[in-house]
Image: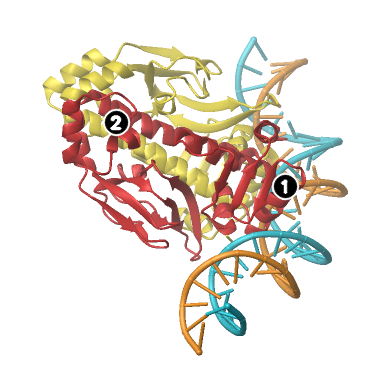
Chain colours: A red, B yellow, C orange, D cyan
DNA sequence: CGTAACCTTGACAGACTTCAAGGTACGTGG
DNA sequence: CCACGTACCTTGAAGTCTGTCAAGGTTACG
């Protein structure tokens, strides 16, 4: 039980008995090296994966052979929710750095959830949060300019890092410009230019992958100010 | 119990006893007239709503006062999943035509789900499907040109209509060009032009809101063939 | 029948992409 | 320890797609 499911996705209070239950839930944890695949699109769905540490991207391969990034997942987040309905993984999951994940067999989770209402509720909240997050990206893709998209992306990372107890204003990007661009619906050159522009304006400092946010309020203002 | 929750979101087999349980689940159904709001962004979340008949859009008001459409919901689909985690509605829900919905108190649903595992599983699948659908929109917004976006949108509607037993190739759009554009990240003029273009190519027939799909394969090809 | 909301089409402008070149960081092997 | 190669990042110039602005037509409903 080195991998605390409680810490990962159960901020709600649990009794010791319930924690005991969860002992049966986690199969094991294992490592995924940078660039390795945790799961492939089309493969059978059996388990969710909680990111113990590290960072992942999810992406799909398009007919022309290029890939589109659909999400980034960091320490403490849950992978695989999209696969529940089709019972197949709908995307590839790739480690951006050497990482560790905990496997959570979904059937077991549902079984055990029958006896721990708060566990079920928590799962529902996590899924709902995923929906809310995706909606945010849709808003971003649907109505924002390049620099606004990047600002929104940085603020989103910032929020998620803060939730996990990391610095919300000083962090290392694990994704390349190309991955970020793919996620934001931009070309890598546009991402690069947008980084430069935000830096020129003094809102952030960019040192390749090391990002510092100087003025969260102004970044938020940039996001809100989408011309339409 | 004129509003069959079973038909709405429970294609899995249920015993009569379970159906009996569900009788307690549905509070009541009611009508929402065209243009009326079913729920407002920021209001407290208590219930999901199953669309008995009719059509809805969800949208958020941006700081500049304009709205962005985040989703369309038709007969048989479930509204409000995004509100579970924040326990507040994250968007406005507006009827596109006179509609009827069934209210499903979420706490009750979770309680009853404790005794009917298949009901819980079904909820998870519905939420997962919502995530998959949103991912599809993200793909669309992130990597497709205007005509490809529109083709993908029409195919998505087609699939959902087919699932509910309606014609997948001949249907009435309930949304305006502006709403569609907002959802697809395009201006209404671009939507209009794209409709015209797809019609010129013989893939569809457009009669204002009445759409006929002539060549689903070619439409799919258009979608897959996104330049990047 | 008239008004308001909605749809279509054209011309021009702006934002992002594409194409191209060069620079920087990192890891491997000599 | 340094050299070299690869992967990644930055910046410029030209091209394309979509947005913007404008005008006119159609539909629906009171």
Q: Evaluate if marks 2 and 1 touch, with contact meaning CB atoms under 8 Å apart.
A: no
On the image, the x and y values in percent for residue B82 come to 43, 28
User: Toward which corner of the image does residue A189 lie, by quadrant?
Assistant: bottom right
Of the two numbered discs 2 and 1 in the rendering, the one whose residue sits closer to the viewer: 1
From the viewer's side, name the closer residue of A207 and A143. A207
Q: Residue at x 39, y 41 (%)?
A: A77
Rendering coords of residue A83 (x, y %): 32, 46
The answer to which of D6 and B93 lies nearer the viewer is D6
The number of numbered discs placed on residues in the rendered structure image is 2
Percent x, y of residue A71: 47, 47
Rendering coords of residue B177 (x, y %): 62, 35
Q: Secondary structure at mark 1?
A: helix
Q: Residues within 10 Å of mark 2 (few under 14, many from 20)?
A: many
Horizontal relation, residue B3 to residue A202: left or right = left
**Residue at 40% of width from left, 37% of height from top?**
B130
Residue on which the image places disc 1 = A199
Q: Secondary structure at mark 2?
A: helix
Residue A117 sits above or below residue A169 on the image: above
- Label 2: which residue? B123
Q: What's the residue at 51%, 49% (across, down)?
A: B139
Question: Callout 1: few (<14), some (14-19), or many (20+) C-alpha neighbours within 10 Å?
Answer: some
- In three-dimensional space, the C-alpha distance between marks 2 and 1, rounded to whole angstroms, equals 45 Å
Where is A159 relative to A196, above or below?
above
On the rendered image, what quadrant is the C terminus of chain B found in? bottom right
């Amino acid at each position: 039980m080195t991998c605390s499911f409680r810490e990962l996705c159960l901020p709600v209070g649990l009794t010791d008995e319930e924690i005991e239950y969860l002992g049966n839930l986690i199969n094991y944890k294992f490592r995924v090296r940078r660039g390795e695949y945790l799961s492939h699109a089309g493969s059978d769905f059996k388990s969710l994966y909680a990111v113990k540490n590290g960072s992942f991207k999810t992406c799909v391969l398009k007919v022309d052979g290029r890939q589109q990034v659909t999400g980034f997942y960091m320490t403490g987040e849950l992978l695989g929710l999209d696969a529940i309905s089709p019972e197949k993984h709908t995307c590839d999951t790739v480690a951006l750095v050497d990482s560790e994940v905990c496997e959570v067999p979904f059937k077991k989770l549902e079984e055990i959830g029958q006896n721990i209402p708060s566990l079920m509720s928590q799962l529902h909240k996590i899924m709902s949060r995923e929906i809310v997050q995706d909606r945010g990206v849709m808003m971003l893709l649907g109505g924002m300019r390049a620099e606004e998209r990047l600002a929104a992306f940085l603020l989103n990372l910032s929020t998620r890092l803060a939730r996990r107890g990391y610095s919300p204003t000083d962090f290392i990007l694990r994704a390349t410009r190309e991955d970020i661009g793919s996620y934001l619906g931009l070309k890598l050159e546009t991402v690069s230019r947008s980084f430069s522009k935000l830096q020129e304006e003094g809102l952030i400092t960019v040192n390749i992958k090391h990002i510092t946010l100087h003025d969260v309020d102004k970044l938020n203002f940039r996001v809100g100010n989408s011309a339409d």
